[in-house]
Amino acid sequence: MITANAIGHFVGYCKKIQPQSQEEIQKFFEGVVGFPYDKELLLQAYLFLNINKLFPACVELLLFEKSPIADYTDLGKCDFVYLTSQNTLFLIETKFIDTEATGATERKRRNKHRNKVFEQVITLKHRFSEYWNINLEELECGVFTTDAEIDWRGNDVNVITKSVSIDKLKHWRKHYKVEEKLKK
């Protein structure tokens, strides 16, 4: 029988392998915004710094870019694992999809990326459930990309999808510090 204790056990494991506080993680992502050397990492910073708007049930980041399966990275690593307000887990895969590129090859590449990000999060959910002995009902999945074309794809596979356009991501990056100072 699977119990909520399995989630507690997993949370304890996360605290050991990723002991940074939420404030330390926030500083890291704010640094990424200031010096974005990687598009995927910038997308992940946007997600982390806007998590309450995008996936409001998420309350605490437990893992970032780590394998939730005892460091077996060959079994997959998850971009984000959050604890939710309902004491369940929320797995999120991110993918920067170049929606600005044109041509048949680029369309094919985009479609491959769309399919892969869903496949990753669904596969990870099942591996996670088996390894940690957590009910599938206690594991939710999300996908976050720069491609609005994915927004409807999650409906049939029980994956919550969100996206931000590349233009909006660029605008947000340029204005992030200004917006944060205005909020204070």
Image (cartoon, grey):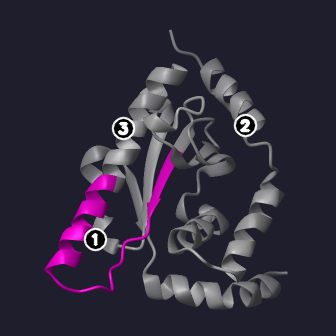
Secondary structure beneath disc 3?
helix
Which residue is situated farthest in the top direction here?
A: 1
Q: Quadrant of the C terminus?
A: bottom right
Q: Disc 2 marks which amino acid?
A: Ile
Q: Quadrant of residue 178?
A: bottom right
Cα–Cα gap, marks 3 and 2:
22 Å
Q: Residue at 72% of width from left, 86% of height from top?
A: 179
Residue at image mark 1: 149
Distance between mark 3 and mark 1 Cα atoms? 21 Å
Q: Is residue 119 above or below residue 175?
A: above
Q: Secondary structure at mark 1?
A: helix
Image-based side of 168 in relation to 153, left or right? right
Q: Is residue 154 magenta?
A: no
Q: Which mark, by number, is residue 184?
A: none
Q: Residue at x 50, y 85 (%)?
A: 168
Badge 3 or badge 2: first in the primary sequence: 2
Q: Secondary structure at mark 2?
A: helix
Label 3 vs 1, first from the N-terminus? 3
Checking the image for residue 17, the label placed there is 2
Q: Amino acid at mark 1?
A: Glu
- Which residue was labeled with disc 3? 123
95 part of magenta stretch: yes
Which residue type does callout 3 highlight? Thr
